[in-house]
Image: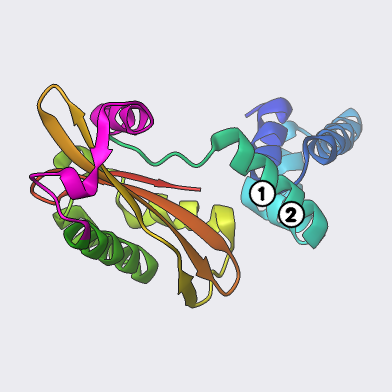
Amino acid sequence: MTEQKYVDAIVKKVIATNARKKDIREQLLCDIRTRMEKGDTAEEVFAQMGTVQEVADSFNESVSQTERKKYIRKIRIKIAIPIVAAVCALICLVYWWIPKGRAIEDSKIFTKEQVESAMMETVTLFERGDYDSMQQNAIPQMQSVLNQSSMNEVKKMFHENWGERTQVGVFYIQEAVQKNTHMAVGQVTVTYENTVVTYTLLYDPDMRLCGFYIK
């Protein structure tokens, strides 16, 4: 591994703003090259400094809460936290905002109570970390992303510890129709002790989860 790759790997794991990461990169490269000029090989320098994770952790320990919040906020904006697996789910989200949507009360397939119940079940399973049950209730295309690793990363983008649920907002539900494909699209904002999350959830006529989006 070259010193550039070693440093890039460290910086990638550091929780900090771009300006701070730039300073860390320059600091590490300068330190490494100074040691190499004294006769040490790159491998010897890396061994002395520690593994990529160890060096990154040492920098993360010194990161202030303010800087952490700035970093997390930037990541949220950049990634927008999309967890939508099926292309049809994305299409339905678009169709929700144009005339192809219809009031859930006019649906011949879904009922408002049925969708609200399914939404609360999905939210509760997500809160509990019961991703196996979420997979069982989802279409095949969604199952691959409903796993502990990806879902925990999503939760961390909002807060390390959400705390207990304190309030459930108003449910907004419509039926989306596209070429004889019907889906129920619901949105609800849930307040927790340490964060607020808006869920947008999609279900097929069998009430299987086919779209999961939070912001």
> Residue 14, can we see it?
no
Q: Residue at x 33, y 30 (%)?
A: 90
Q: Residue at x 13, y 21 (%)?
A: 179
Residue extending farthest to the top is 179
| Residue at image mark 2 | 68
Question: Cβ–Cβ below 8 Å for labels 2 and 1?
Answer: yes
| Label 2: element kind | helix
Residue extending farthest to the front is 106
User: How many labels, in total?
Assistant: 2
| Residue at image mark 1 | 72
| Label 1: element kind | helix
Q: Which region shows up in magenta?
A: 87-112
Q: Is residue 23 magenta?
A: no
Residue type at numbered disc 1: Ile
Report the Cα–Cα distance between label 2 and label 1: 6 Å
Q: Is residue 104 magenta?
A: yes
- Label 1: how many residues lie within 10 Å, few (<14), some (14-19) or many (20+)? some
Residue type at numbered disc 2: Arg
Q: Residue at x 15, y 49 (%)?
A: 208
Q: Where does residue 72 sit, x and y in percent of width and height?
A: 66, 49
Marking on residue 90:
none
Q: Residue at x 55, y 36 (%)?
A: 79
